Amino acid sequence: MKRTPLSLALLAVLALGAQAHAQATKPADKRQAPAAAQKDPAFFAAVTGPLMDTPEAVRPDLQRFYALRGYERVWTKDAQGAFARALADAQRHGLDARDFLDPQADLKDPVARELALTTAALSYARALALGRVDPTEMEGLWELKRNAVDAPLGLDQALKTGDFGGWFAGLAPSDRGYTGLSTAYLHYLDLVARGGWPAFAPGAPMKPGDTDARVPALVQRLMIEGDLEQPVEGEIYDTVLAEAVKKFQARHGLAADGVIGRDTQTALATTAQDRARQIALNLERRRWLPRQLAPERIEVNTAAAIMVYWRDGQPVDARRVVVGTSKNQTPSLEKPFNSLVANPPWYVPAGIAAKEILPKGPEYLAKENMYVTADGRVIQRAGPGAALGLVKFELQDSYAIYLHDTPSKSTFNLAKRHKSHGCVRVHDAIEFARLLLSVDPLAAQKFEEQLASGETKRVELSRSIPVRLLYWTAFVNGQGQVAFREDVYGRDMKLAQALGLDVKLPGASAEDAVADDVGP
């Protein structure tokens, strides 16, 4: 992103602003202005003026901060040193300290230096607490709760106590997901500094037992990332290497078959620098979100097509899901639900009906147990073969996005599960419903009765459970390893552009359509 130190041009503007302020100020105005404004009118004019080189998002914070401080200058040598030490920690967050305070800037002028330091401190605080970019500008639909911070008040307190390190450290997320990625980021930067790993040349698929000149490079590649523990000599792709490749494939969301085909070769060819930058993108995404989360919640990683259920603040269940294709993306949402629907019918969205169902004719509708209402709406009757399966988890949103069962069970066996029209299909959804109801005996009994009846019935839960649909292309998996996923929705590239990162990452490979699968 564009660096924004106060420039010499701004000093000229500030000087003119100070002169105009002094000329326009009447004696009555002086009596009402803060004492600091009377002592230092040039500085007061600079703070309350246009602040042309200050990022627009930071200007209100900067002006509020100096209002809290009575428009007095605050940056002593001790304070500058403390801030410099705190800013030196930016790298572990995937941030560049130079984006906040340019070491080459000419800050001999005391006013310029004062405002540049304050702008840098507030900008850095906002980056740690809120992220550097607005997530709603990164995605077509992004409706998750945001983190909040009072940066001016926090900086004021940090200056008073001298605890810059503690304040800045407390702004970034401290959960395992963030700190694990932060550690991984530094590790990958270290790999980059040591030369990364050898390039893996594209070519014919490699299968166990093959002899291939690329094997030595493959051995180095797998050892550097820890998928292979001991070196293997020669050019034979043996079973030991195949097992290491399976670990690599599993970490990257690929079919763990030990065959080095197109997708595995693409992942192997990605550089250490690009993986480091991919981690930085996902650190940014995590900074957008609140630090305090509901102890019971459901989180769906739409990039990995994995769902995790949290209870009492701990992950108690993880399972595969099917999410939207690159053309019908599952959005980033946070919505609650407090009811299940047993034996749900499917009210087919008009777009799907017009493009994918009605053109197939009345025989197809009859075969799929569908009918058309008087007003032209297509509805699929409830039943085991219905697109929603036997249970729907009703999210309270206005986008018709929900979690549900599906008759297309085989799709869960795929490594790549971006096949839906945007909703989230849950593997073994009936058992998952039973897990949610295990703490609610009355609702559990009612659900079993309604399920067996074959009738469409709603079952109310005794509590509301939030569901978060998230997009993580780099994350720490259950084994404590860094896992990567393809940028199926193209969101990494857009975020990288906004952050000014030059990164080349595997995008979405060709999606294999599932025959006759028109479900949500």
Image (spheres, rainbow, N blue to C red):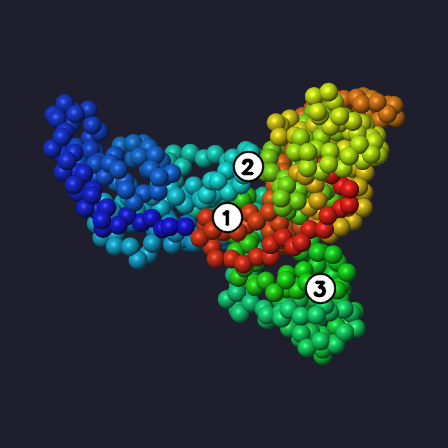
Q: Would residue 76 be found to the left or right of residue 383 on screen?
A: left
Residue 130: where, in percent of width, then height? 47, 40
User: Which numbered marker is on residue 261?
Assistant: 3
Give the mark nearest the N terminus, 3 or 2: 2
Please state which of residues 360 and 274 is positioned toward the viewer in this rendering: 360
- Is 122 drawn above or below residue 270 in the view shown? above
* Gap in angstroms between the C-alphas marked 2 and 1: 13 Å
- Is 71 drawn above or below residue 119 in the view shown? above
Residue 257: where, in percent of width, then height? 77, 60
What type is the residue that disc 1 sits on? Leu
What type is the residue that disc 3 sits on? Gly
Name the front one of labels 3 and 2. Answer: 3
What type is the residue that disc 2 sits on? Trp
Q: Secondary structure at mark 3?
A: loop
Residue 499: where, in percent of width, then height? 45, 50
Give the mark nearest the N terminus, 2 or 1: 2
Give the mark nearest the N terminus, 1 or 3: 3
